[in-house]
Amino acid sequence: MPRVVKHPEVRRGELIAAARALFFEKGYEATSVDEIIGRAGISKGAFYYYFPAKEAVLEALAEQMAREAANETQALVADQTLNGFERLDLFLKHNRRLKVERAPEALALFEALFRPENIALYHHVFTRISRVLIPLVADILQRGMDDGSFLPGDADAMAEILLGLTTTTHDSVAALVGAPSEEAFQVAAAAFQRRWVAQGIVADRILGLPEGSIQFIEPGFAEAFFAGWRLKQAG
């Protein structure tokens, strides 16, 4: 039979899909390049043609997951009856729900991303995710500026600043991931909650909204997001 030659993007997608499944099953650190190659059914040379290292696969996977979430959210915020604030509020609510629903998959990567030695990888991943989300958030902000929901300004710059606030949660998330006991987890969860509330206040001031308008997370979010992971750790 003649050899089937696949389009490069198809082959690359197969590698990401194989890595995604393995990272979820075993965790990022426990998955080897050889296992990804075996799952995808390609040669080692083909793997390194598309990705210089396993870290690059993780970055591509993070971007893919962000794009999936953005596509879902974009359909929701396209509702022309919504004003700018309502669009942003819907965007944040939908993202909170997706994070909890997809927590097991995300947490399979967190143990790697929030290790102190992987801080550079964390920032690379954040950059890839921001590249996807900034245009969507900027569009929401611009619509809100046009209808008077938000203070006027540079929508692209403000979107980048608002998304950049999430990088300041790195240490609080790392504390949750590395909590050695239930007591330590609860202390870290409270600090995590306070951090996000503070960021909501900053966002309110940037956009000219009353304090408490922007809610990045809800009370109990950390417990809900980490529920399955904590059971796994306890087992």
Image (tube, rainbow, N blue to C red):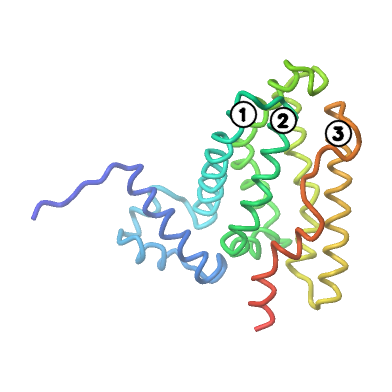
Q: Badge 2: few (under 14), some or many (20 or more) residues near its Cα, within 10 Å? A: many
Q: How much space separates mark 2 and mark 1, taking CA atoms?
A: 8 Å
Task: Say which quarter of the image contains residue 44.
Answer: bottom left
Q: Verify CB contact (< 8 Å) between mark 2 and mark 1.
A: yes
Residue 38 % position (x, y)? 35, 66
Give the total number of marks visible in the rendering.
Answer: 3
Residue 35 % position (x, y)? 41, 68
Which corner quadrant holds the C terminus? bottom right
From this viewpoint, which residue is outermost toward the left? 1
Look at mark 1 in the image and give the residue it sits on: 135
User: Residue at image x 51%, y 51%?
Assistant: 61
Name which of mark 3 and mark 2 comes first in the sequence.
2
Residue 125 % position (x, y)? 62, 47
Q: How much space separates mark 1 and mark 3, taking CA atoms?
A: 20 Å
Residue 181's label in the rendered image is none
User: Residue at image x 57%, y 68%?
Assistant: 29
Q: How much space separates mark 3 and mark 2, taking CA atoms?
A: 13 Å
Q: Badge 1: few (under 14), some or many (20 or more) residues near its Cα, within 10 Å? A: some
Residue 159's label in the rendered image is 2
Residue 204's label in the rendered image is 3
- Identify residue type, mark 1: Pro
Name which of mark 2 and mark 1 comes first in the sequence.
1
Q: Secondary structure under badge 2?
A: helix
Task: Say which quarter of the image contains residue 28.
Answer: bottom right
